[in-house]
Amino acid sequence: AQAPAMPAAAAPANSPAEAASPRDQAAAHKAPKAPLLRGMQGLVPVWRVISDVPVNVRSQPSIEAEVLGKKHAGDHVRGHQRGEWVELVDEPGYLIIIGAHTKKLLLGRAGMAASPKEVPQGRTP
């Protein structure tokens, strides 16, 4: 008789995915290049501000561009990734994903939403 198969072990808590550099983490958040699957039309990525310091909303995808406002830790926005930036959908502006000077990850993907009503409101911890 054969010995029963052992269940696969769960990944350790500090797996390589959690220890990835900010640039690797941002790469994992890239929008898919393939066409949207049926049932996903109209969905837009939701991003959450994970930075401890406010993130500038810029008029163009450049750290030299005019500051239109700020987003704070826990704020959620809908937008499409454009290189190292997120172009906002529900208001004018762009947010940088990785801090230009700090090199820290500032935004993280938080799901998909078809309308602003589906985006969490207020700040979440």
Image (spheres, grey):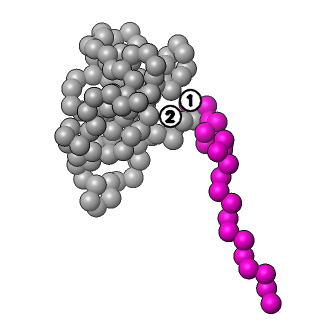
The image quarter containing residue 82 is top left
Q: Is residue 91 left or right of residue 111?
A: left
123 or 108: nearer the viewer: 123
40 or 106: nearer the viewer: 106
Does residue 101 lie above or below 49 as drawn?
above
Q: CA distance from mark 1 to mark 2?
A: 6 Å
Write the start and end of the magenta stretch as one range.
Answer: 1-23
Contact (CB < 8 A) between labels 1 and 2?
A: yes
Residue 16: give x, y in percent of width and height: 66, 42
- At 72% from the left and 76% from the top, the residue drawn is 5
Residue 97: give x, y in percent of width and height: 44, 27
The image quarter containing residue 96 is top left
Amino acid type at image mark 1 = Pro
Amino acid type at image mark 2 = Ala
Q: Is residue 125 left or right of residue 44?
A: right
Work out whether residue 109 can be spotted. Answer: yes
Residue labelled with disc 2: 26
Residue 21: give x, y in percent of width and height: 61, 31
- At 39% from the left and 52% from the top, the residue drawn is 34
- At 32% from the left and 16% from the top, the residue drawn is 70
84 or 111: nearer the viewer: 111
Q: Which mark is residue 54?
A: none
Q: Is residue 93 left or right of residue 7?
A: left
Residue labelled with disc 1: 22
